[in-house]
Amino acid sequence: MTTWSVVKDDTKENRRPGRYFRYGILASLAVLVISLGLALTPGPPPQAPEPAFSERARAAALAETMQLRLAGGKLADAVSGAERQALIRAVTLLTTQARALTGPDHEPSPVATGTATGTPTGTATATPAPSAAPVDSPAKLVAELSASGAQRLSDAEESDGGMARLLAAVGTAQLLQASSLATAVGSAAPEMPARSLPSSAVALSTTPEGSCPPAPTSSGAAAGTATPATALAMTVKTEAETVYGYQVALARLEGTAAGSASQLLARHESVLAEAEALSRAQCVDIPAREAGYTLGPLFLESPAAGLGGLEAGTLPVYGDLVALSDGSTRQWAISGLLDAAHRAALWGADSGPLPGIVVDTANLPELPNTGPAPDSGETESSGTESAGKGTAPGP
């Protein structure tokens, strides 16, 4: 009896390792099956890289311009006469700008209007603007055009060079168009953005003598290469020529035109001083002022129109400075571009749909059929001409 009991107990103990072994095998198989299942389950798709700030700014500008274009077309179809023609001019301008913003590698998108938010290296994207009342009146279109133009100038401050120039041109033209449209439809004229200066001209001119490094030798930038320094030097030279033009025109103008020219001459003298102060602060050689500059015979025959052409001729110079500079200098250049386009308009000169950019609109990509546009019977301005109409600006 005792022997049998001992044998029976030994048999149970010998069977336990086998049972544990089977449990281990089953557990290992379960872990293997679960692991294979997890490995075969597709993970989330990789996220697309965040678009650069310049691209977000371009997309926002295009979306808003397309919406304003569509709203302007609907408003033009509902009215007639001078108001209709003013709206058609706004639609024509917005169409050209949308074509420029589309570019060969982009398509216009019917997304909500928005702004490019965040810093150039931020993670924000073009975000929809807060819901607002529909653009159901010319006065509302004026307000929205003005807001869009101001936003484009703001985005230009942080965008890459070429895109900064394009956004500054779009914003400048939209602000001028808003002002022109307000006059035509009897709406309140929008306020122009406050002029931006890096600091006072006096502060900029206090760079100590001899604090600038020696001028680069021939091993530096190649001759003819566009640089921030060459763009700033050209701005100084252009402003000096413009001052001379105003001085010559003043001797041939009378009445209100002479008074306006006198005020704008003082403005250009101030801008020239600012440009020279910026040059000294950035150790850029200031071009020597010449005793006189060449003015065509048409300028002497019609000085008011000549001043309009002179102002329009400064726009590409400021456009170059916008593209090649950054920081406070770019802010100053954007303000200069807007001021120059405004002065050109005062003299009756057309700055085109993209002030500061010489462009043949025939080479811009066509827009798809995104909505009805009013039939104006007018041809689109190429934006390459700046001949003035000879009208005198107001004070």
Image (spheres, grey):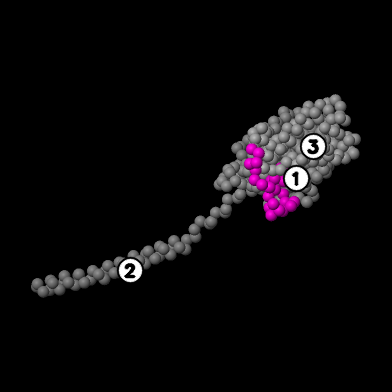
Q: Position of residue 26 (x, y in %)?
A: 33, 67
Per the image, the residue denoted by label 1 is 357
Q: Position of residue 247 (x, y in %)?
A: 82, 32
Structural crowding at the residue carrying mark 2, measured as other residues with C-alpha within 10 Å and reported as few (<14), some (14–19) or many (≥20):
few
Q: Is residue 218 magenta?
A: yes
Q: CA distance from mark 1 to mark 2?
A: 76 Å
The one of 70 and 64 positioned closer to us in this rendering: 64
Q: Which residues are magenta?
A: 208-235
User: Does residue 38 appear left or right of residue 345 in this picture?
Assistant: left
CB of mark 3 within 8 Å of CB of mark 1?
no
Classify mark 2: helix, strand or loop. helix
Q: Position of residue 106 (x, y in %)?
A: 68, 52
Q: Quadrant of the N terminus?
A: bottom left
Q: Given this view, does label 3 or label 1 mark the residue nearer the observer?
A: 3
Residue 377 location, quadrant: top right
Q: Could you tell me the amino acid type at mark 2? A: Ile
Per the image, the residue denoted by label 2 is 25
Q: Given this view, does label 2 or label 3 mark the residue nearer the observer?
A: 3
Mark closest to the chain's N terminus, 3 or 1: 3
Mark closest to the chain's N terminus, 1 or 2: 2
The one of 381 and 11 positioned closer to us in this rendering: 381
- Residue 321 seen: no
Q: Could you tell me the amino acid type at mark 3? A: Thr
Classify mark 3: helix, strand or loop. helix
Q: Could you tell me the amino acid type at mark 1? A: Ile
